[in-house]
Amino acid sequence: MNKQIVIIGGGASALMLASLLPKKSATVIEKNAAPGAKIVVSGGGKCNITNAVMSPDFFLADTSFVTPALEAFNEKDLLRWLKRRGLEPVLKKGSQYFCKESSRELLSLLQKESRKQTFFYSETVLSVNKREGHFYIKTDKRMLTADAVMVASGGLSFPRLGAGGIGYEIAGHFGHNIVKTAPGLVGFTVQKEQFFFKELSGASTEVVITVNGQKCKGSLLFAHKGISGPAVLDASLYWEKGKMEIDFLPGFSWESIRKSPKQLSSLLPMPKRVTKAFLLQLKLHDKTGNRITDRELLILKGLNHYSFAPAGTFGYSKAEVTKGGVDTTEVDSRTMMSKKCEGLFFTGEVLDVTGRLGGYNFQWAFSSAASCARFFTGRQR
Ligand SMILES: Cc1cc2nc3c(=O)[nH]c(=O)nc-3n(C[C@H](O)[C@H](O)[C@H](O)COP(=O)(O)OP(=O)(O)OC[C@H]3O[C@@H](n4cnc5c(N)ncnc54)[C@H](O)[C@@H]3O)c2cc1C
């Protein structure tokens, strides 16, 4: 097939698309002066590429939509594809795959694989129209025509790295519904009752957060503005408004505490200053375990289900992803083609698919790109 394709955006999904499509078939338009800005900063500079434990359950999305793409190009396919090109990500934190030294390893590989296409940098797409079977892509520098358009322009998070709403505007123009967007994988600001959290800035502790029936385990980091850390970021995917519950002492055995001659601030498995701050809030003294009363024990056990309502989130400027996006009921799950406009495709974060923390968002960016590219190449894996 000798179609001329325009890819909007030069991020993770676009670079994979450009790598998999036939030589000289695509023009990539990227607003930034260089591609893959989010790849560079991701995973603390080492890019958490994917995860050995992969299932649609790790995505806030319609399972029937994400399954075909995740199965057709899964984490093993991705790792194999990278390995054949000289990149072997390393396993860390149990099941997460990261670049060995730097995210640039992945970015360089994708740039090398995709250089068979044309790239326009520092160029912003303004609109897309379709007339008589042809797409007209207006940028701030020119008008391009194409037989197919792939919208890989990402979501709204991290505007300083190029994020913007053009993908939703294009989708809306072609009659697509946009599922309400919100910052995701983001920290929470707190209300007055939790202002004492801010004074604990820098301390972290292991928690289990329950929000809207979902459990998120991991570290909670007290931050200058509120709370952050892996468990909190995951919890943000399921929080809309209202309360959440934090177990600050998951699995802690209360039986032994009554016999101990140690003080509570040494007994409870949290950083001392965190325990002391909670004791102050609970109006309890930092006494030895063997001196606490039944009433005090009952109050302490409240730390297993600390309920509070965040004031809000840190917003798009700090969010790793955007929840919501192009309604997936209007997109073909095998090809990523719009059901409303032939030749218009959506891949990556612009869609209403959000992965949990752990490499799931890059896997989605790559899996959805692979499904889309397969439509043009017919090639399996
Ligand atoms: C700080 C941070 C850390 C992260 N860490 C991880 C991680 O370790 N693992 C993980 O799985 N995910 C991580 N993510 C999420 C991941 O980066 C995204 O989900 C992923 O990059 C989405 O890929 P995409 O191609 O859909 O969009 P993007 O990578 O955002 O690419 C979209 C591109 O489109 C360009 N663009 C936008 N508008 C226009 C326009 N009008 N004209 C031209 N170009 C335009 C943008 O400049 C951008 O380059 C992280 C995100 C952030 C912000």
Image (cartoon, grey):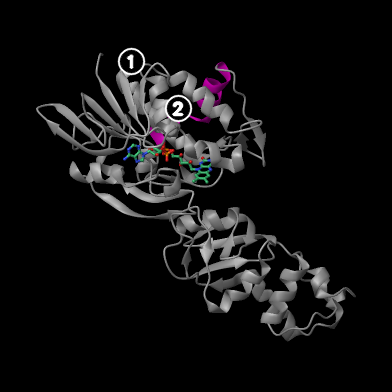
In the image, is 93 to the left or to the right of 22? Answer: right
Secondary structure under the numbered disc 1 in the rendered image: loop
Q: Quadrant of the C terminus?
A: top left
Secondary structure under the numbered disc 2 in the rendered image: loop
Could you tell me residue 326's position as x and y percent? 30, 45
- Sequence-wise first label, 1 or 2: 1
Residue lying at the far right of the rendered structure: 261
Indicate yes or no whether the magenta region holds residue 73.
yes
Could you tell me residue 329's position as x and y percent? 27, 43
Residue lying at the far left of the rendered structure: 132
Q: Nearer the viewer, mark 1 or mark 2?
A: 1
Indicate yes or no whether the magenta region holds residue 52.
no
Q: Quadrant of ligand 1?
A: top left
> At x 44% / y 36%, what residue is drawn?
364
| Amino acid tagged 2 | Phe
Q: Quadrant of residue 256?
A: bottom right
Q: Quadrant of residue 297?
A: bottom right
Mark carried by residue 112: none
Boundaries of the magenta span: 67-84
Could you tell me residue 116's position as x and y percent? 40, 16
- The rendered magenta stretch, by its main secondary structure, is classed as helix
Q: Quadrant of the N terminus?
A: top left
Asked if one can make out residue 76 in the rendered structure from this viewpoint, the answer is: no
In the image, is 109 to the left or to the right of 290? Answer: left
Reading the image, the residue beneath label 1 is 24
Mark carried by residue 73: 2
Could you tell me residue 60's position as x and y percent? 43, 49
Circle 2 Cα neighbour tier, 10 Å, few/some/many (<14 / 14–19 / ≥20): many
Asked if one can make out residue 29 in the rendered structure from this viewpoint, the answer is: yes
